[in-house]
Image (spheres, grey):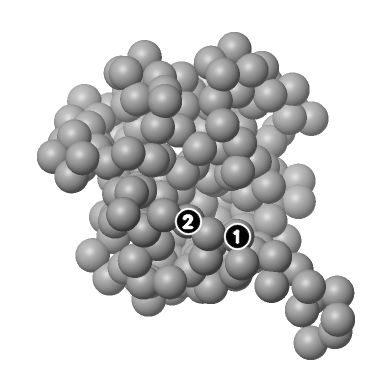
């Protein structure tokens, strides 16, 4: 490891050491799936960014997060959002395919830190393109229960991508009354645009960046 990497690792680790472990935190990882990283709907720069996210998770102490939730698009092949079916997007995150899988480095880092981490899915309805996990009735109910039943005080958000799934999830959490809890991990959020949409969401809702 060269000196630059040593400094970067120390920065990440020392940042976490300053976290108040008495505060119950949720790490919410939005759609860290292969099709958004190096597949049919890949976000520019996503591989290195998601590797950095995995490294960030690896250096966290066991009590850094009370719980972790991963969200995932999980579309049927005939989904209305696909171009072949009149939608906007190429075929992506089809149920039971590699492209729908959580990116392995992130998945392994999460499971090592918190084996009980959950995956919540969205986009199963053929006719509905659910960008936000909160747009899926069943998953929204589960996520809100996790937040409220566990008295979560901080929600750290990362994933793909800021102008669609991450951004809409953040907006819906704000609307649900949890805006004061949100901490946006912008360095671990990829965007299709240049980041303008996410910056506007952060500014408009007076959200904290980490």
Residue shown at the point (86%, 81%) measured from the top left: 3
| Res. 122 mark | none
In this view of the protein, which residue sits in the foreground, 208 or 174?
208
Q: Is residue 135 above or below residue 104?
A: above
Q: Which part of the image, by quadrant, shows the C terminus?
A: top right
Residue 143 image point, x, y percent: 25, 37
In this view of the protein, which residue sits in the foreground, 24 or 18?
18
The secondary element bearing badge 2 is classed as loop
Pointers 1 and 2 in contact (CB under 8 A)?
yes
Spatial separation of the CA atoms under disc 1 and disc 2: 7 Å
Residue 104 image point, x, y percent: 49, 69
The secondary element bearing badge 1 is classed as helix
Q: Is residue 209 above or below residue 13?
A: above
Q: Name the residue under label 1.
A: 15
Q: In which quarter of the image is residue 49?
A: bottom right
Q: In this view, does 184 lie above or below 127?
A: below
Q: Name the residue under label 2.
A: 19
In this view of the protein, which residue sits in the foreground, 178 or 173?
178
Residue shown at the point (54%, 25%) measured from the top left: 207
Residue 201 image point, x, y percent: 59, 19
Residue 129 as seen in the image, left or right of residue 59:
left
- Does residue 205 show up? yes
Q: In this view, does 61 lie above or below 1?
A: above
């Amino acid at each position: 490891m060269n000196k630059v990497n040593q400094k970067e690792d120390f920065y990440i680790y020392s940042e976490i050491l300053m976290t108040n472990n008495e505060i119950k935190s949720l790490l919410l990882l939005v759609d860290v799936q292969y099709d958004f990283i190096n597949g049919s709907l890949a976000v520019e720069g996503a591989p290195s960014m998601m590797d950095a996210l995995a490294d960030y998770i690896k250096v966290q102490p066991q009590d850094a997060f009370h719980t972790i939730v991963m969200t995932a698009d999980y579309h049927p092949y005939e989904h209305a959002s696909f171009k072949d079916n009149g939608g906007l997007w190429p075929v992506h995150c089809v149920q039971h395919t590699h492209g729908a899988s959580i990116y392995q480095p992130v998945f392994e880092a999460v499971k090592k830190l918190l084996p009980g981490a959950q995956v919540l899915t969205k986009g199963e309805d053929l006719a509905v393109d659910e960008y936000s996990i909160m747009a899926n009735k069943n998953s929204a109910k589960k996520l809100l229960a996790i937040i409220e039943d566990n008295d979560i005080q901080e929600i750290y958000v990362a994933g793909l991508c800021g102008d669609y799934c991450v951004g809409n999830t953040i907006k819906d959490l704000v609307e649900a009354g949890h805006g004061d809890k949100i901490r946006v991990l912008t360095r671990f959020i990829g965007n299709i645009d240049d980041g303008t949409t996410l910056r506007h969401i952060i500014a408009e809702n007076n959200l904290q960046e980490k």
